[in-house]
Image (spheres, helix red, strand yellow):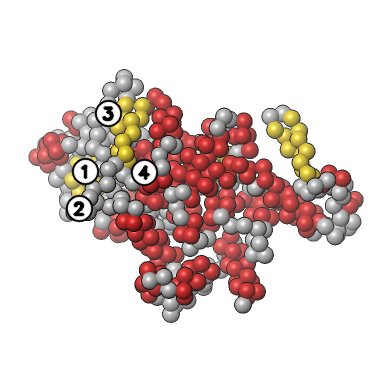
Amino acid sequence: MNAAHTLLMVLYEKDSRRPFSDDNVRWIVRDLKASSMQTELSRNQPRAKAVMKRVPHVLPYRERVKMLRELVSKDRQALGLVQTRDAAPRPTYVRIHRSRFLEDAYSQLCQLSSLSLKGTIRVKFVNEQGLDEAGIDQDGVFKEFLEDTITRVFDPSLSLFKTSADQRLYPSPYSAAQDNYQALFNFVGRMLGKAIYEGFLVDVPFADFFLTNLKGTKYSAAYSPFDELASFDPDLYKNLSYVKHYDGDVSDLDLSFSVNREFFGKVETHDLIPGGRAMTVTNENKIRYIHKVAHFHMYTQLRHQITAFVHGFHSIVNPEWLGYFSPREIQQLISGDSVALDIEDLKKHVEYLGGFHAGHQVIRWLWDVVGKDFNTQEKALFLKFVTSCSKPPVLGFSHLNPPFSVRFVDTSDDDAGYTAATVLRGFFRRSSRSFATRLPTASTCFNLLKLPNYPNKTVLKEKLRQAVTSASGFELS
């Protein structure tokens, strides 16, 4: 039975990295009902626990995501983080200066316990002049804060992370030169964990091998680092593949069980096994050699960064929950589905404010432009413009938090923010003036599109396309 399970998981992992076919339901057991599995899990039934631990992929991905959200909900309840008639959990307040955003975020949040970080956090921003910014924190300001924090810490210019050849992120070995780098990686891991815990999507693409580490997968008969080496360094993968398939005597290549690494201008030699630099690679040991090289580059040289990051991440997201998903599916949890924008699903779950409604002429033009005139890339840019993420929510727009909203804006509302006065003024003035020169804006913290009352569809299309392609117009409500 164990051998059969190992073979099954080898095939599944290979299929996850490079699908055998376009049939995405080939692993699904149709007679297995997700609702029954959820009930059995809640009752701690052995069958359900075994399925979710050993072969969770037999359930559809979306059903497993629903199970994850249910587990998060139950975790909140168990920790007393849900308001009841008898008790209301106390939020944690943080004050963030725009001029020292990351410093304040790190100093205040790294000291919080996992329990506090899982709870409600209220953010007050302080502007460049030292004044508190006006804003309504209905979890929207925290969403902006978390997204901005994650965007900044994953910026390769900060030197904590590097990008692979296909522009995917992984920890930089040079980050070890920074003071307290392990504490920084722990902090970043906790922030990403908080995003998943809250169901927020962030546009942060990770290299496959790092996602595997994030899940906690260990070297086994079903997994080898060499399988994912191409996601780290395609050239190194190509060179090691050459060694693997070399027809002649590999010892002629003059290789040893060691690697050279340049670190800040200094070449360092690292043994892959004890005394490795004195051991020649031969036809008999070449397979061991390529696996050792892959393991060194993707784990050994990064082990302190990865360990700290994963520890922080798992302090918020239970690693057992991550076991429900493949590494590629974990990327979907982080950044959303790589599918086309479903306009009809979005229209069903959008909220209209300030006098707009589903039958309003401008709203009909809006969905006509986005649905029919925008190409796939422009639709993704539109979604990113409003929500800060270019991909749709995993479970559809009914699960987007806060909900996608479109609000009428008057030209006099530029700096007033989202208040009752501006909403009422917008309602009564929505037909009173021309908006042909103003661009749409967005408050990503509220997933809110602020749309003027354009005189015709042509102007709306021109202004909306200009706004989403230039990414101009962010406002904090």
The numbered mark at residue 133 is: 3
Earlier in the chain: of badge 1 and badge 3, it is 3
Earlier in the chain: of badge 4 and badge 2, it is 2
Residue receiving disc 4: 116
**Element under disc 1:** strand
Other-residue count near label 1 (Cα within 10 Å), few / some / many at <14 / 14–19 / ≥20:
many
Earlier in the chain: of badge 3 and badge 2, it is 2
Q: Which of 151 and 266 is in front in this view?
A: 266
Q: Are marks 3 and 2 in contact (CB under 8 Å)?
A: no
Q: Do the residues labelled 3 and 4 touch (CB within 8 Å)?
A: no
At horizontal 22% and vertical 50% (from top left) the residue drawn is: 87
Numbered-mark total: 4
Other-residue count near label 2 (Cα within 10 Å), few / some / many at <14 / 14–19 / ≥20:
few
At horizontal 58% and vertical 52% (from top left) the residue drawn is: 213
Q: Do the residues labelled 1 and 3 touch (CB within 8 Å)?
A: no
Type of residue at label 4?
Ser
Locate residue 381, reporting x and y percent: 39, 45
**Element under disc 4:** helix
Residue receiving disc 2: 86
At horizontal 90% and vertical 50% (from top left) the residue drawn is: 252
Q: How far apart are marks 1 and 4 (CA)?
A: 33 Å
Residue receiving disc 1: 407
Image quarter where the C terminus lies is top left
Locate residue 170, reporting x and y percent: 57, 44
Other-residue count near label 4 (Cα within 10 Å), few / some / many at <14 / 14–19 / ≥20:
some
Asked if residue 212 can be seen in this view, the reply is: yes
Earlier in the chain: of badge 3 and badge 4, it is 4
